Image: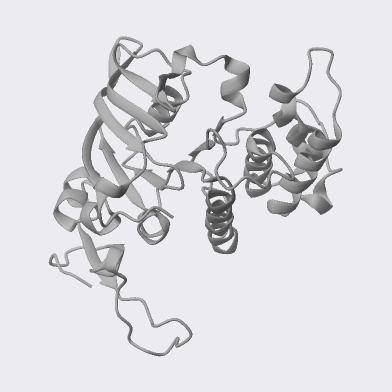
Amino acid sequence: MVTLSDDARLPRPLLEVDDVSVVRGGSVVLENVSLSVQPSELLGVIGPNGAGKSTLLQAMAGLLPHSTGSVRFAGEPIEGWPRRRLARRLALVGQATGWSFALPIREVVALGRYPYQPWWGGESPVDRQAVQDALAWTNLTELAARPVTAVSGGEAQRVLLAQALAQIWQPGDSRSEPETPPVLLLDEPTAHLDLGYQVGFFSLWRQIQTRLRAAIVVVLHDLNLAGRFCDRLLLLSQGHVVDWGRPEQVLQREQLERVYGTPLWVGHIVENHPGDPGAVGQASPQRSAGIPVVLPAPPGACHGRV
């Protein structure tokens, strides 16, 4: 996990967005957006519907042309990366919207290995191991033979995540510092999951960060999950960056009320001492104010803090 107490010590950004604007259908959906994400960092993108969050992920993946600015991956313009090579290091997981073909889940996950295979196709032992590991990480092993059309919304999201993991993962890779760490771009991956799976996915992403120094950018609507697990947050509204920084800096009542247009209560929970669930602990140096908590204020209630 990236420590943000001293930005001067951060490694070189893995993915950089510099002054990017995107126009779609004659409308400006992103305007002058700049950000960077480091190896081993979990960056949360938050904001109301229509803020431009999904568009930002597509631009970061090099899938959308931008009218101004640039996107750089590992220091190079993303447009200059050969698509097959880029696909081995960067994966975009969109929102599950249904399936047209009743392929078994295992075959859908195996599609993530396409960038590694020769044009005539065929799985290698490494491909098979990658698919097996991806199914195991996402708790889909027992469902591998089930048609993907017969899964729930939450299971469908896990299938997409497993496919992305198979895409960026090299089984048996013991290098602590890959030449170019991978990037996962996740568009609302926890939207259809229950709380246990949501927390489980954040735990899984931390493992990926530890093993591969992966950078993860995740679009979230749950501000409390974002505040609890993300290293930094980017707050978007109407295509503009409102704020960018540590969760306790970004999740401020006044600006959240302005962006979301509703009264809120914002407070902080101080973490307990490890191994002492009943103790009142001290916040970590990186979370000096504690873990931010955002709640809707009851109708007619005065503004306040939890």
Residue 11 position, x and y percent, is 36, 42
- Residue 228 is left or right of residue 83, and the answer is left
Nearest the eye: 255 or 130: 130
Q: From what the image shows, is residue 247 above or below residue 116?
A: below
Residue under the point 58% across and 16% down: 83
Nearest the eye: 296 or 12: 12
Which image quarter: residue 281?
bottom left
Q: Is residue 298 visible?
A: no
Residue under the point 42% across and 90% down: 278
Quadrant where the N terminus lies?
bottom left
- Residue 269 is left or right of residue 140, and the answer is left
Q: From what the image shows, is residue 40 above or below residue 127?
A: below
Which image quarter: residue 227?
bottom left
Count of numbered circles on the image: 0
- Residue 162 is left or right of residue 240, and the answer is right
Residue 245 position, x and y percent, is 25, 48
- Residue 176 is left or right of residue 306, and the answer is right
Residue under the point 63% across and 49% down: 154
Residue 238 position, x and y percent, is 25, 31
Q: How is the image coloured?
A: one colour
Q: Is residue 77 visible?
A: yes
Quadrant where the C terminus lies?
bottom left
Residue 201 position, x and y percent, is 57, 54
